[in-house]
Image (spheres, helix red, strand yellow):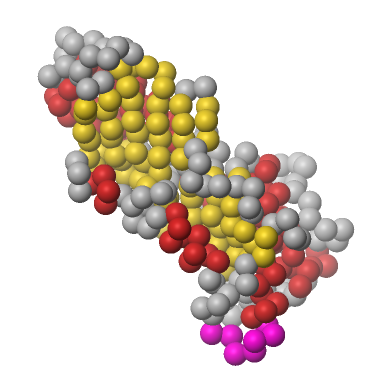
Amino acid sequence: MTQRRNDLHRACPGSGIDLHRACPGGVEIEKTTPVPIYTPDTAHIVHSLRYDWTGWLKEPANFPQTLSAAIGQCRAGWETDGLELDAWQAEGNRLQCLFTAKPDTSPSHCANRAKGRLQHALRQQGTPVDFSRRVGMRTLGDNTRPIVERYIARQVGKSDYVDPRFKEYLGRFTVENAGVILAEPQATGHGRYWYNLHLVMVVADRRHPITRPETFIKVREGCFRIAEKKGCQLAEVSVMPDHVHLALRGNIELSPEGIGLAYLNNLAYLLGYNRCWSEEFYVGTFSEYAVSAITENA
């Protein structure tokens, strides 16, 4: 049912505009900056976001005994950064911290604040240390990558549409991008990042789902174009009549909230600059192993 990337409605409720006619000429992402329809103030983000940060000292020595007190000193500051410390463990010159993140907190922001606040707190404790520029950042969730990818790939198969021809047709809009392997990290000059997101968007009114072939195509192709524009890499997409699932590698400078809103606004622009999507969307993190692998050993 799943199509490889290499092979390649109705009007919005209340808009009075036929979406496929509103977007002549195929898929185009905006070249100007129109006023966003969806904003952090209006969107309701259902989220499950966990960041696992690992830092190393420059020297192979162990962390000082003041580390626990320093971490306790950092907790309140991290919460103002959108990060709640769930667990931590130190071994030799390596420190691993697991955070629950707010949706407006990016991995790069987490990495900067984790190291910066710890260095400051340890200096105040009278035991200054120098962290290496090398970091490891991994997003985690209750489900692992294979589970998330299978779930997206099976959207059509588990649907309750009676007509097998319609199910076969929908299969064209579940696409696996073989060129993106989410198990592999993104390497930067400062370390390695596994920033994997599962994003789910729902049409504004499920009583008026996507039905026109032109709209299905615009949404499917638009999802890849938006990822490219935002410095993300889309691994899997499933466009269903009333919702869309994405599995992607995010741009580490962008928060989950920022990526989700970028998709809502750009897809709304493609479909006639209308409020086509629900204000509520879901975004969650995942990786090769579940968050329980860390919390059980912390």
Q: Nearer the viewer, residue 75 or 138?
A: 138
Q: Position of residue 268 (x, y in %)?
A: 67, 58
Residue extending furthest bottom? 162
Q: Quadrant of residue 84?
A: top left
Figure check: 236 above or below 213:
above
Q: Residue at x 67, y 65 (%)?
A: 3
Q: Is residue 111 visible?
A: yes
Q: Is residue 39 visible?
A: no
Q: Nearer the viewer, residue 2 or 121?
A: 2
Figure check: 77 above or below 263:
above
Q: Nearer the viewer, residue 122 or 270?
A: 122
> Is residue 85 left or right of 66 when viewed as pictured?
right
> Is residue 211 left or right of 158 when viewed as pictured?
right
> Is residue 133 left or right of 58 when viewed as pictured?
right
User: Is residue 113 one of those drawn in magenta?
Assistant: no
For the C terminus, the quadrant is: top left
> Is residue 279 left or right of 56 when viewed as pictured?
right
Q: Residue at x 54, y 72 (%)?
A: 155
Q: Which residues are magenta?
A: 160-166
Q: Quadrant of residue 139?
A: top left
Q: Residue at x 64, y 89 (%)?
A: 163
Q: Position of residue 59 (x, y in %)?
A: 29, 12
Figure check: 157 above or below 281:
below
For the N terminus, the quadrant is: bottom right
Q: Position of residue 74 (x, y in %)?
A: 24, 27
Q: Position of residue 160 (x, y in %)?
A: 54, 85
Figure check: 55 above or below 278:
above
